[in-house]
Image (cartoon, helix red, strand yellow):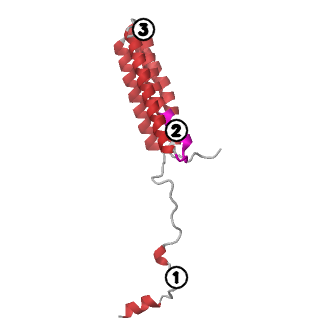
Amino acid sequence: MTPSPVSSNPILRRTLLWSAASAAVLALVAGGIGYAVAGMNGLWSGLLGVVLAVLFLGITAGSILFANRWFGDPLYVQLFFAIVLGGWLLKLGIFLVVMIVLAGQSWVVPLVFFLSIVAGVAMSLIVDVIVLTRMRLPNVSDISLPTVNPEDETPEGSDGAGSAASEGK
């Protein structure tokens, strides 16, 4: 398999993997705290909050990874922004529908649900910072450097006498 030409792909993949692993741990913690505070309703509220936070944050990274498949295409920029914007609109629509549906549910413990979403977002930000600080990404990826210093070469048709004559003045 050839490496991806888009340098952000390994970072996004690693972020998704680390987020999934840390979300599993956070789901256990949020579910446990929710159960301790409010019983089974707290457990489900905590788990649902973590799942929603991870889902919404994963849609962005997933849409960027998906959009990067068209790298090199003449319409890459337009496709990239259309796909990422579509992902954001999808998140907004899902968020509104989920919040409207959950607003009338008696089993949702609002404080546990809210705090688990906040913890999921904070966990995702922490994972992003850790992954970005540990990844080695070149500042300039698509450049070819010269192999010879142009100042060391003599211009064509010159035998170097011109520089000696100018020094003698």
Which residue type does callout 3 highlight?
A: Asn
Residue 15 in view, yes or no: no
Which residue: 47% across, 91% down?
161
Classed neighbour count for the residue bearing mark 1: other residues with Cα under 10 Å, few (<14), some (14–19), many (≥20): few
- The answer to which image quadrant residue 163 occupies is bottom left
**Labels 3, 2: front one:** 2
Classed neighbour count for the residue bearing mark 2: other residues with Cα under 10 Å, few (<14), some (14–19), many (≥20): some
Q: Residue 89: image x %, image y %?
A: 43, 28
**Labels 3, 1: front one:** 1
Question: Which part of the image, by quadrant, shows the N terminus?
Answer: top right
Q: Residue 88: image x %, image y %?
A: 43, 30
Front-most of residues 100 and 135: 100
Which residue: 47% across, 36% down?
82
Q: Residue 85: image x %, image y %?
A: 44, 34
The residue labelled by disc 2 is 67
Which residue: 50% across, 23% down?
24
Residue 113 relative to residue 6: left or right: left
Which residue type does callout 2 highlight?
A: Ala
Question: Which part of the image, by quadrant, shows the C terminus?
Answer: bottom left
Q: Which residues are magenta?
A: 61-74
The tag on residue 8 is none
Q: Earlier in the sequence, mark 3 or mark 2?
A: 3
